């Protein structure tokens, strides 16, 4: 059985989820586990903190995990070989190359080493337990999938999912299958907060309603979002998702539009006080990452590891030191200068494809560093957080929405 609760910002989603988890834990007389699933480690910590606040500890049969960890440990690692003949025993999440050919090659090399990239986790988990997938084309293969689903259901009694709107269609499909296989699945989320996969949660609700899925009445009450902000947000919401403030806190909204150089001091001032400063996505002089995400192609890591062993050095430490040195050199050196240094320093011989992939990645890292004068947060990073002062840096489209300067015919587009 699947139960879905739609609840807006400040409706107490994490608190209510923690209450439900504790309730079912106290009623649980079986050996089965109760899982609380979140999208981020920050959200995982919030649920952990809420449970500890009430019980003083995390019960043995209660597991609080990110959705990626859950899929890896309960679906992919134990069952990928059994149902889809692929073995995985490790996962990585670093940024993949933007060039399609390099990206596919990277994923292929990872697969050969039994490593799965985080981008593939949702789809691979669905492939393993979805008997309608093309990989399970005959009765014997479908029987394997059924066995896996029954095996998971024998271990887990309940799955509680926080911020379900952050999941894509593949992840939602996995939980639907689990819910149809004797696991009680409870999802709570807010479709209008779906940033990464807009529309996926809303579509899932439409397709699942009445088909073994119970959609509860919307919780549109909020203690956290002030009245003045609701005046801006409610006109942009669907009628059934407009929110009401229950504590009467008014709040205050203003805007600054300036080309004065001193404007930058405002950003620095509020950053120093620890307030929330965020933007939809990086643009112009604003970036959302403070550190450069540097990695080396797997084939180069292997070569460097071999060089380290031949010098009687620790392979991981040797590679880490090289990445650290490259990161430092990126401040003052070109990509070609860095590769020249790397070759001399480590006696490394690069194949043509390795050279092309490395220089493409270094150029990408350099470009991302040049564009960033102010490092602020993304909307995804600040969702669910609070601050007395919140500064939202607007692009032109967002400004037009907030000032209601969008023609009705274009109102419900991607930005909406």
Image: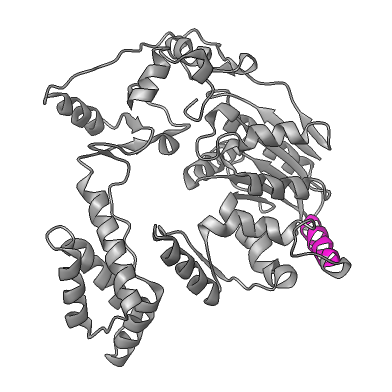
In percent of the image, x 19 and y 40: which residue is there?
Answer: 373
Q: Quadrant of the N terminus?
A: top right
Q: Is residue 134 left or right of residue 398?
A: right
- Which residue range is magenta in the image? 142-153
Name the image colouring.
one colour
Tell me, yes or no, if residue 125 can be seen here.
yes
Looking at the image, residue 103 sits to the left or right of residue 194; the answer is left
The question of residue 7 being in magenta is answered with: no
The picture places residue 369, in percent across and down from the top left corner, at 23, 50
The x and y percentages for residue 310 are 30, 92
- Identified at 32% across, 81% down, the residue is 351
- Left or right side of 6 for 113: left
Q: Position of residue 47 (x, y in %)?
A: 56, 40
Quarter of the image holding residue 86?
bottom right
Q: Nearer the viewer, residue 258 or 274?
A: 258
Q: Magenta span has 144?
A: yes
Q: Is residue 337 above or below residue 272?
A: below
Q: Look at 48% across and 74% down and name the residue there.
A: 109
Farthest front residue?
Answer: 409
The residue at the far right in this view is 139
**Looking at the image, which residue is at 29% across and 80% down?**
350
Q: Is residue 85 above or below residue 362?
A: below
Magenta stretch, main secondary structure class: helix
* x and y percentages locating residue 218 in the rendered image: 68, 21
Front residue of this view, candidates 287 and 222: 287
Q: Is residue 253 above or below residue 314?
A: above
């Amino acid at each position: 059985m699947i139960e879905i609760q739609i609840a807006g910002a400040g409706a107490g989603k994490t608190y209510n989820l923690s209450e439900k988890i504790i309730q079912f834990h106290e009623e649980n007389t079986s050996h089965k586990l109760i899982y609380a699933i979140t999208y981020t480690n920050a959200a995982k910590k919030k649920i952990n903190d809420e449970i500890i606040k009430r019980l003083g500890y995390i019960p043995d049969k209660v597991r609080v995990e990110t959705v990626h960890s859950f899929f890896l440990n309960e679906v992919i690692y134990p069952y990928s070989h059994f149902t889809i003949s692929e073995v995985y025993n490790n996962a990585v999440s670093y940024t993949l190359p933007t060039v399609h050919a390099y990206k596919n090659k990277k994923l292929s090399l990872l697969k050969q080493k039994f490593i799965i990239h985080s981008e593939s986790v949702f789809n691979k988990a669905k492939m393993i337990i979805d008997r309608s997938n093309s990989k399970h084309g005959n009765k014997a293969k479908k029987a394997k999938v059924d066995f896996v689903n029954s095996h998971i259901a024998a271990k887990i009694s309940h799955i509680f999912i926080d911020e379900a709107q952050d999941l894509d269609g593949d992840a939602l499909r996995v939980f639907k299958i689990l819910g149809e296989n004797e696991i009680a699945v409870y999802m709570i989320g807010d479709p209008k907060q779906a940033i990464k996969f807009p529309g996926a949660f809303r579509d899932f609700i439409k397709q699942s309603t009445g088909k073994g899925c119970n959609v509860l009445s919307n919780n549109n009450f909020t203690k956290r979002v002030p009245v003045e902000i609701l005046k801006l947000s409610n006109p942009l919401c669907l009628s059934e998702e407009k929110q009401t403030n229950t504590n009467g806190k008014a709040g205050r909204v203003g805007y600054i539009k300036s080309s004065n150089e001193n404007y930058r001091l405002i950003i620095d001032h509020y950053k120093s006080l620890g307030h929330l400063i965020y933007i939809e996505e990086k643009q112009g002089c604003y970036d959302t990452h403070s550190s450069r995400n540097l990695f080396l192609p797997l084939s180069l890591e292997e070569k460097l590891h071999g060089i380290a062993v031949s010098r009687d050095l620790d392979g991981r430490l040797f590679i880490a030191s090289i990445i650290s040195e490259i990161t430092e050199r990126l401040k003052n050196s070109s990509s070609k200068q860095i590769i020249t240094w790397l070759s001399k320093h480590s006696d490394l011989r690069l194949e043509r494809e390795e050279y092309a992939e490395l220089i493409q990645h270094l150029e990408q890292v350099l470009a991302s560093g040049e564009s960033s004068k102010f490092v602020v947060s993304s909307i995804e990073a600040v969702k669910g957080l609070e601050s007395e002062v919140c500064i939202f840096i607007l692009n032109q489209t967002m400004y037009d929405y907030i000032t209601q300067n969008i023609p009705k015919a274009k109102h419900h587009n991607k930005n909406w």
